[in-house]
Image (cartoon, rainbow, N blue to C red):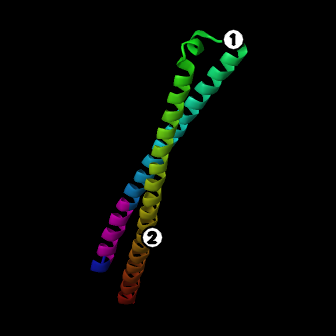
Amino acid sequence: MSRQARQTADLALLTATVLAARQAEMAALKAEDAALVALLSTLDSALSSRLSATTALREADPAQLAGADPRWQGWIAARKQTINMERARLRAAQDIAHNRLTQAFGRNRIAETLHKSAREADMAARARRAD
Protein backbone atom coordinates (compact mmCIF):
# COMPACT_ATOMS: atom_id res chain seq x y z
CA MET A 1 0.00 0.00 0.00
CA SER A 2 1.39 3.39 -0.94
CA ARG A 3 1.89 6.22 1.47
CA GLN A 4 -1.06 8.09 -0.03
CA ALA A 5 -3.32 5.06 0.32
CA ARG A 6 -2.32 4.66 3.99
CA GLN A 7 -2.95 8.34 4.66
CA THR A 8 -6.34 8.28 2.98
CA ALA A 9 -7.23 5.11 4.91
CA ASP A 10 -6.36 6.91 8.15
CA LEU A 11 -8.38 9.92 7.04
CA ALA A 12 -11.38 7.72 6.18
CA LEU A 13 -11.16 6.06 9.60
CA LEU A 14 -10.98 9.43 11.34
CA THR A 15 -13.94 10.86 9.44
CA ALA A 16 -15.96 7.69 10.06
CA THR A 17 -15.30 8.07 13.78
CA VAL A 18 -16.40 11.70 13.73
CA LEU A 19 -19.51 10.75 11.76
CA ALA A 20 -20.41 8.08 14.32
CA ALA A 21 -19.97 10.61 17.14
CA ARG A 22 -22.22 13.12 15.38
CA GLN A 23 -24.85 10.42 14.77
CA ALA A 24 -24.76 9.49 18.46
CA GLU A 25 -25.13 13.15 19.41
CA MET A 26 -28.20 13.50 17.19
CA ALA A 27 -29.70 10.25 18.50
CA ALA A 28 -29.30 11.43 22.10
CA LEU A 29 -31.05 14.71 21.32
CA LYS A 30 -33.90 12.89 19.59
CA ALA A 31 -34.27 10.49 22.52
CA GLU A 32 -34.40 13.41 24.95
CA ASP A 33 -37.08 15.08 22.82
CA ALA A 34 -39.08 11.84 22.68
CA ALA A 35 -38.96 11.61 26.49
CA LEU A 36 -40.28 15.16 26.77
CA VAL A 37 -43.08 14.41 24.29
CA ALA A 38 -44.02 11.37 26.38
CA LEU A 39 -44.06 13.53 29.51
CA LEU A 40 -46.32 16.06 27.79
CA SER A 41 -48.63 13.25 26.75
CA THR A 42 -48.75 11.96 30.33
CA LEU A 43 -49.65 15.40 31.65
CA ASP A 44 -52.34 15.82 29.00
CA SER A 45 -53.87 12.43 29.76
CA ALA A 46 -53.80 13.10 33.51
CA LEU A 47 -55.54 16.42 32.98
CA SER A 48 -58.17 15.00 30.64
CA SER A 49 -58.88 12.02 32.90
CA ARG A 50 -59.28 14.34 35.89
CA LEU A 51 -61.62 16.60 33.93
CA SER A 52 -63.71 13.67 32.72
CA ALA A 53 -63.86 12.24 36.24
CA THR A 54 -65.11 15.50 37.74
CA THR A 55 -67.58 15.97 34.90
CA ALA A 56 -68.97 12.49 35.48
CA LEU A 57 -69.62 13.24 39.16
CA ARG A 58 -71.77 16.30 38.33
CA GLU A 59 -71.04 17.71 41.73
CA ALA A 60 -67.97 19.21 43.31
CA ASP A 61 -65.54 16.76 44.80
CA PRO A 62 -63.39 17.54 47.84
CA ALA A 63 -60.43 18.67 45.74
CA GLN A 64 -62.58 21.21 43.92
CA LEU A 65 -64.14 22.43 47.17
CA ALA A 66 -60.68 22.94 48.66
CA GLY A 67 -59.54 24.84 45.57
CA ALA A 68 -56.91 22.25 44.78
CA ASP A 69 -58.16 21.49 41.28
CA PRO A 70 -57.46 24.95 39.80
CA ARG A 71 -54.05 24.98 41.49
CA TRP A 72 -53.26 21.54 40.09
CA GLN A 73 -54.39 22.64 36.64
CA GLY A 74 -52.18 25.72 36.99
CA TRP A 75 -49.26 23.51 37.94
CA ILE A 76 -49.92 21.31 34.90
CA ALA A 77 -50.00 24.38 32.63
CA ALA A 78 -46.76 25.74 34.12
CA ARG A 79 -45.07 22.35 33.82
CA LYS A 80 -46.17 22.01 30.17
CA GLN A 81 -44.79 25.48 29.46
CA THR A 82 -41.44 24.53 31.01
CA ILE A 83 -41.34 21.30 28.99
CA ASN A 84 -42.17 23.13 25.78
CA MET A 85 -39.38 25.64 26.45
CA GLU A 86 -36.98 22.73 26.94
CA ARG A 87 -38.21 21.21 23.68
CA ALA A 88 -37.53 24.53 21.92
CA ARG A 89 -33.98 24.49 23.31
CA LEU A 90 -33.62 20.90 22.12
CA ARG A 91 -34.86 21.83 18.64
CA ALA A 92 -32.17 24.50 18.40
CA ALA A 93 -29.55 21.99 19.56
CA GLN A 94 -30.87 19.47 17.02
CA ASP A 95 -30.50 22.05 14.26
CA ILE A 96 -26.87 22.65 15.21
CA ALA A 97 -26.26 18.90 15.53
CA HIS A 98 -27.87 18.30 12.13
CA ASN A 99 -25.51 20.80 10.51
CA ARG A 100 -22.54 19.10 12.18
CA LEU A 101 -23.83 15.69 11.11
CA THR A 102 -24.24 16.85 7.52
CA GLN A 103 -20.70 18.21 7.50
CA ALA A 104 -19.29 15.02 9.02
CA PHE A 105 -21.18 12.92 6.48
CA GLY A 106 -19.81 14.96 3.58
CA ARG A 107 -16.27 14.78 4.90
CA ASN A 108 -16.58 11.04 5.37
CA ARG A 109 -17.84 10.53 1.82
CA ILE A 110 -14.96 12.58 0.43
CA ALA A 111 -12.40 10.70 2.52
CA GLU A 112 -13.81 7.35 1.37
CA THR A 113 -13.71 8.51 -2.24
CA LEU A 114 -10.10 9.67 -1.85
CA HIS A 115 -9.14 6.35 -0.28
CA LYS A 116 -10.86 4.39 -3.05
CA SER A 117 -9.05 6.47 -5.69
CA ALA A 118 -5.70 5.93 -3.96
CA ARG A 119 -6.26 2.17 -3.81
CA GLU A 120 -7.25 2.08 -7.48
CA ALA A 121 -4.14 4.08 -8.37
CA ASP A 122 -2.02 1.59 -6.39
CA MET A 123 -3.59 -1.36 -8.19
CA ALA A 124 -3.09 0.29 -11.56
CA ALA A 125 0.57 1.00 -10.73
CA ARG A 126 1.08 -2.63 -9.66
CA ALA A 127 -0.56 -3.87 -12.85
CA ARG A 128 1.72 -1.66 -14.96
CA ARG A 129 4.79 -2.93 -13.10
CA ALA A 130 3.67 -6.55 -13.53
CA ASP A 131 3.33 -6.14 -17.30
Q: Residues within 10 Å of mark 1 (few under 14, many from 20)?
A: few
Amino acid at pointer 2: Gly
Is residue 12 in the magenta section? Answer: yes
Residue pictured at 48% horizontal, 39% vertical: 83
Question: In front: 73, or 3?
Answer: 73
> Quarter of the image holding residue 125?
bottom left
| In the image, residue 27 lies in the stretch drawn in magenta | no
What's the amino acid at mark 1?
Glu
* Dot in front, 2 or 1: 1
Q: Report which residue position mark 2 lands on.
A: 106
Residue at (44, 53) in percent of width and height: 26
Name the residue rendered at 49%, 34% in the picture. Answer: 78
Image coordinates of residue 87 in percent, x first then y, are: 49, 46
Instruction: Provide the secondary structure element on which disc 2 rests.
Output: helix
Residue nearest the observer in this picture, 89 or 110: 89
**Residues at badges 2 and 1 in contact (C-beta under 8 Å)?**
no
Q: Which residue is mark 1?
A: 59
Quarter of the picture holding the C terminus:
bottom left
Q: Secondary structure at mark 1?
A: loop
State whether the magenta stretch is mostly helix, strand or loop.
helix
Q: Position of residue 38 (x, y in %)?
A: 54, 35
| Image quarter hosting the N terminus | bottom left
On screen, residue 29 above or below 18: above
Instruction: Please report the bounds of the magenta region as a residue range.
Output: 5-18
Q: Position of residue 119 (x, y in %)?
A: 39, 77
Specify the farthest residue to the left: 3
Question: Is 109 drawn above or below residue 29 in the view shown?
Answer: below
* Residue 67: % across, % down: 54, 17
